[in-house]
Amino acid sequence: MSKSNEQVLDAVVVGTGMAGLYMIKRLNDQGLKIQAIEAGSGVGGAWYWNRYPGCRADLPIIEYSYSFSKELQQEWDWTEVMAGQPEIESYLNYTADKFDLRKDIKFNTKVTDAVYDEAANLWTVKTDQGDTFTCTYCIMATGCLNEPNYPGFKNADAFTGDVYHTAQWPKDGVDLTGKRVAVIGCGSSGVQSIPVMAKQAKELIAFQRSPVYTFPAKNAPMNPKFLAQAKVDYDSIREQQRNNEMGICNYRGPKKPKDPNVAPKPRPSKKIMDLTPEQRKQEIKDFGINVLTLYADTYFNAEANEIASQLYCEYLQEFLGDDQKADALSPKNYPLHCKRPVIDTEYYGAFTQDNVSIVDLRATPVEEVTATGIRTSDKHYEFDVLVYATGFDAMTGTIKKLNIRGRDNMQLSEQWENGPRMYMGLQSAGFPNFFTTTGPGSPSVVSNVLHSIEQHVEWIDNCIAYLRENNIKTIEPELAAQDAWVEHVNEAAKGSMMTAPTCNSWYLGSNIDGKPQGFMPYLAGTKTYREECEEVVAKGYEGFSLAS
Ligand code: NA7
């Protein structure tokens, strides 16, 4: 049930994914009057919307799960190592129920406006359901991958068959049995869904603009003994995550005592440049293709990266044994590690099926959508179902669409016209008491994002508590501190393969036509970033302007 529209609330939280749910809990624990607003009919955010076949976590779930509640950690029994969307959605529903969070959420409602009234020092938040909420703090927990991207193909609406986007997949699922299916896009969503859809569909055509580097997920049913041990070890797991720059500790379970009669296995080399060509191939044989993600020099050294990229393409050629498919699927024109890592389950295996084909849009671009299919520069393809796996207007898309106005009626989308400007990914100058979880300029999507979410939620919650305890009316970044932070974020990304000249990714905004380009997340690492956030607080919220 929603709160009375007359009531002045302490806070409005927008979005009830992993960040929103934890934010509600923390603010409830402080005893604040709050309202959360959710566009979906249920909680889960990205894990509510992305219910396409094959959707699953790309990190081991033991580490990609809430750490804030020891009880929750002990109560929830994961059934897979890399849990799938249905299980994660159930877990988030369980979390919402356990901490009684639904009472604060208005579902099926989209925020349209958030406007700051300087005289009253209040935000007025409006929704598409006609609500008006007034609050002191406005917190956008809208996530980084929320606004689906539909490519602007000529005659896009002409297709008369069924059309879906992976990020807006129907709740009741889609029966593809006997259907001819076209999938546009081969990023994570395409890579995860294609093998599953290919098992059902009569025919599947993958329309691919950029081939991906993808690595086997090695998912498996959760071993009950491993899970039981993880529950014992959780304190240490979380501590190790906090001490790692990605928020990941690669928990392997209990260390087994070494057998003195068995020679220890060799460890993969740290640098690909230290190996001879023969040794490189041997390491792939010994450790699998995933070894290419372990060589530290491939992340910053273009020559090392080129070697790894070539080895990847050779491996693919050998695996597929089909020149047309291997050539089309080979990511030759941009470096490894440029995009967010893609983790797959039998992706290339799907292309060995006779009913699966690939269209290389680099060679034959889409000319138009027709009533029955897609025409490329080469030929017309007919199908019954069109699936867009074309990703998101990431990190800024949702926020820029809303009418968010701060001091002097200044609009956030205008302030961000040439790219997002935030201090520490938490606040934007001119927008007092307005916070963003995992905003641009924080590690967010270049880390274990749930780890980063928890850190942000706790920082914001502690900040609000501090303001209230000290009768401070507003907090917002100083412009100079914000400018310096944006510069610092750019510096941190320099030299990384993620900003290589041939790299095109949603981190850079280059996946969306006309979007200003610049590397949005903060690459220095989660440990470094958390320490920087703590230091800012220790120095009396250095770089923020606090007014009583
Ligand atoms: P991604 O990773 O942005 O992938 C989108 C895919 O769609 C990618 O292959 C794009 O090719 C392709 N795309 C986008 N626009 C077009 C057009 N106009 N024509 C052809 N192909 C196009 O989104 P995902 O949903 O797969 O994954 C997002 C994140 O979710 C992922 O990183 C994980 O963290 C989970 P491109 O590469 O731009 O050439």
Image (cartoon, grey):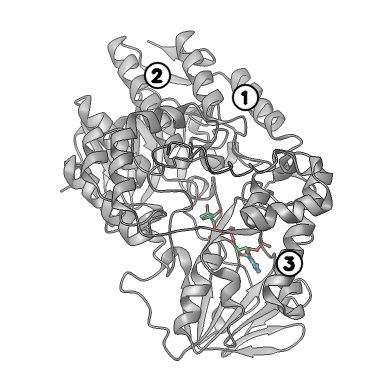
Q: Position of residue 427 (x, y in %)?
A: 49, 29
Please identify the quarter of the rendering in which residue 48 is found.
bottom left
**Amino acid on which the number 2 mark rests in the picture:** Thr
Labels 1 & 2 near each other (Cβ < 8 A): no
Residue that appears at 22% across and 49% down: 94
For disc 1, the marked residue is: 485
Q: For mark 2, does the 10 Å Cα neighbourhood hold few (<14), some (14 to 19), or many (20 or more) residues?
A: many
Q: Nearer the viewer, residue 13 or 79?
A: 79
SS for dot 2: strand
In x, y percent, where is residue 523? Answer: 62, 34
| Residue sticking out furthest to the front | 261
Q: Nearer the viewer, residue 201 or 252?
A: 252
Residue 271 lies left or right of residue 219; in this view the side is right
Q: Which residue occupies 40% across, 19% down?
A: 474
Answer with the quarter of the image where residue 84 lies.
bottom left
Q: Is residue 352 left or right of residue 240?
A: right
Task: Name the residue that disc number 3 marks.
Answer: 330
Q: Which mark is residue 474?
A: 2
Q: Earlier in the sequence, mark 1 or mark 2?
A: 2
Q: Where is residue 316 shown, x and y percent of the image? A: 70, 68
Label located before the other in sequence (3 or 2):
3
Three-letter amino acid code at disc 1? Trp
Secondary element at tag 1: helix
The residue shown at (36%, 59%) is 221
